[in-house]
Amino acid sequence: MSQTIAELNEHFAIRDHVTFHEDEPGMVKLRIATSASEATLYLQGAHLTQWTPTGQSPVLYLSPKSALAPGKPIRGGIPVLFPWFGPRWNADAVAVTSPMHGFARVTVWTLERTHLDPNGDVHITLSLPPDETSRSLGYDHFATKMDFRIGAELHMAITVTNRGAEPMVFEEGFHTYFAVDDVKEVLLDGLRGSTYLDKRDDMIRKVQRESLFRFTRDVDQVHVKTAEALTIHDTNRQIHIAKEGSQTTVIWNPWTVLTPGLPDLAEDSWTHFICVEAVNAMDDRITLAPGATHGMSTTVRLTDKKR
């Protein structure tokens, strides 16, 4: 059952910290304010489109050409990918067309809880139960939750419970668009020694040899069996990314090669973001036993650039 703006503000608003709005028809969002940061979270997709620590520029990139409309994926922020990553690996198992990256990012989630803790952080919990769409795609017996903790750091977690009698196989991901000054000047630290599938080179398996990864062309790499924390070295700051429950790291930038084929990106969008994603996919796909629960989380924080 959908939640109206009036009902949401009556039951879940927190004075000076959480309010609900519908600036775009059919797109309900939370505006979140703490002493340490501001954020924007859409109920569709449990999609965080903004997180800006006090005194900083936005940490997340949102495309100026992104659709903000019911049923349309949002380009930027942190899309939640579930129950598959990219094209569905077992699409032949169902008769209907399976949407790219799963159904969770274009489904309206249910708000379960808002809370202001003694430290001043805002906590948000959303849930995604089975519905007609998920059932048509073969997912009928599951429970999914998203938890956000928003303050000086950003923490988000997804939990999936298998309520069926058979093992549940799925993929998941946080497809995070990190805002950077100039992608050509960015260095990414933490992937040295990892094995990756190069989606821009016929899925050939390669090894990351260098300590620091530099973006010099279009990139789409799936680093498997890796749980290491990463650091984005931007012009004036460092973005630190830690994760738990994720064994796959994906990095992506469309460069000038793919951008023209993506109508919801501006011509120069590629210069202002990199995607660094906490994922479980391909080699690290999850098989969840009946009654079991799996969790994946990521934490993001900023520091000034070391001089």
Image (cartoon, rainbow, N blue to C red):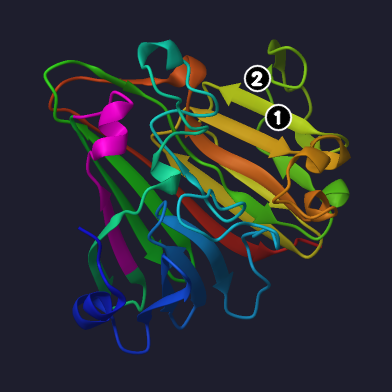
The mark found on residue 196 in the picture is 2
Q: Closest to the observer: 146 or 29?
A: 29
**Front position in the image: 74 or 306:** 74
**Is 307 placed above or below 192 here?**
below
Q: Is residue 69 left or right of residue 146?
A: right
Q: Residue furthest bottom?
A: 16
- Whether residue 123 sits left or right of residue 143 in the image: it is right
Task: Identify the secondary structure beneath mark 2.
Answer: strand
- The amino acid type of the residue labelled 1 equals Asp
Residue lying at 76% horizontally and 32% vertically, measured from the top left: 219
Magenta stretch: give its range: 123-140
Q: Residues within 10 Å of mark 2 (few under 14, many from 20)?
A: many
Q: Looking at the image, is 284 positioned above or below residue 51?
A: above
How many numbered discs sit on the rendered protein? Answer: 2
**Crowdedness of circle 1 by 10 Å Cα count: few (<14), some, many (20+)?**
some
Q: Position of residue 159 (x, y in %)?
A: 28, 41
Task: Identify the image quadrant of residue 210.
Answer: top right
Q: Which one is nearer the viewer's eye here, 222 or 242?
A: 222
Q: What is the x, y in percent for residue 251?
A: 66, 35
Disc number lying in front (2 or 1): 1
Residue drawn where x is 38% and y is 31% of the image: 83
Find residue 65 and report its horizontal and vertical position in percent: 70, 59
User: Disc 1 on helix, strand or loop?
Assistant: strand
Q: Which of the 4 quarters of the picture holds residue 221? A: top right
Q: Which mark is residue 255?
A: none
Residue 192 in picture, x, y percent from top left: 69, 28
Residue positioned 15% across, 22% down in the render = 290
Left or right of 135? Residue 273 is right
Residue 108 belongs to magenta span = no
Residue at the spot of label 1:
220
Q: Mark 2 or mark 1, which has the lower sequence index? A: 2
